[in-house]
Amino acid sequence: MWRMGDVLAGNHAVWEFDSDSVLIRFARGMRTPRLFHALGSRRIPFEAVSNVTVTAGKRDTVVLRALPRPGADPLMDAAAGQLKEACDPYRLVLPGDRAPLADAFAEEIRSRLAPDADEPTSRFLVDAPQPPLQLKAYDARIAFDGSTVSFHWSRTGATGTKWKAGDQHYPLTALTGLAWSSPEGPGGHLRLLLRETGHTAADPRPDHDLAAAVFGTGYGAVHESLPFAAALLAALRGRTPVGAAARAHSGDDRLRHLSELHTAGLLTDGEYAALRDRFAAEPL
């Protein structure tokens, strides 16, 4: 019988058993997917899980996988099945000789699943990951302050349609959802679904849609754009807003993060100075 605090260590992650959840701590090795680096750790309540499976893997390994309930995790809802198998945060690869341990772990979790585990949830049960303050796409810099999503078009990447229209600002109240298309496939982008248009973009092409930002090589990578999309989706559905999550960090951490964004060119000198002064003045 698995008890609180017992752990199961596999490739790239350690799963820790708790009375009502599984805490997944991701490794930070060179071969670990960068998405796992960005996630750090995640607590998955048993009520957010629909099933747990154990299957044979490649090269004498065994794969333990929790299946999230539809609507339970903003990260997986935003991903919409586009994550590669190796980047699935609900998947743990173990040496083949640990199959009995994996079976016992899975059985213990299955015994604690909710009676309606096969049904979609009406609200998110898993916290959204902490996203970057801003996301740099190919044709825009996307910002979200907890209440409004802004697209600041790039002089070099944006089409004439977007550049002539000027920067766009969308309050959460104007949105019904979003669609994330992986940058690892053709046509990667982040599109906001607008209430006034009934989800239909005026121009379906992401590079012409004023409510969409286009990804590209080096712009909007999965480990950056997916957590951003998940946090935005959680805010849309009433989960913890990005602003509230950011304020939970210490002042030193926030200022250090701002400095990193400034160094990387994601914040202008003026934006960096304004945010630095504002955060420094806020009480912790």
Image (tube, helix red, strand yellow):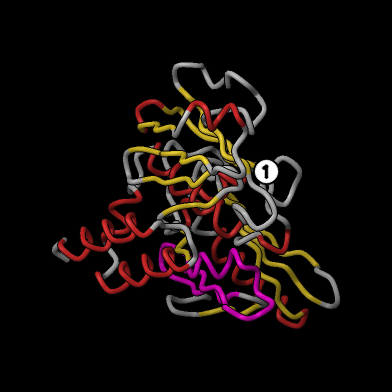
Q: Find residue 187 and report its image quarter.
A: top right
Image height of 207 relative to 53, above or below: above
Q: Which residue is mark 1?
A: 188
Write down the region rendered in magenta. Answer: 13-41
Q: Is residue 7 left or right of residue 255?
A: right
Q: x, y percentage for residue 128?
A: 44, 53
Image height of 260 relative to 74, above or below: below
The magenta stretch spans residue 35:
yes
Residue type at mark 1: give it.
Gly
Q: Which structural element holds mark 1?
A: loop
Q: x, y percentage for residue 43?
A: 45, 63
Q: Is residue 261 left or right of residue 171?
A: right
Q: x, y percentage for residue 209?
A: 58, 28
Mark 1 crowdedness (10 Å alpha carbons): few <14, some 14-19, many ≥20 = many
Q: Find residue 202 and report its image quarter.
A: top right
The magenta stretch spans residue 198:
no
Q: Quadrant of the C terminus?
A: bottom left
Depth check: give the residue in front, 139 or 212: 139
Q: Is residue 280 left or right of residue 72?
A: left
Say how many tags the image has.
1
- Image point 72% across, 64% down: which residue? 86
Depth check: give the residue in front, 238 or 24: 238
- Image point 26% across, 59% down: which residue? 247
Image height of 28 relative to 241, above or below: below
- Image point 48% across, 57% down: which residue? 46
- Image point 53% across, 32% down: which residue? 163
Depth check: give the residue in front, 228 or 139: 139
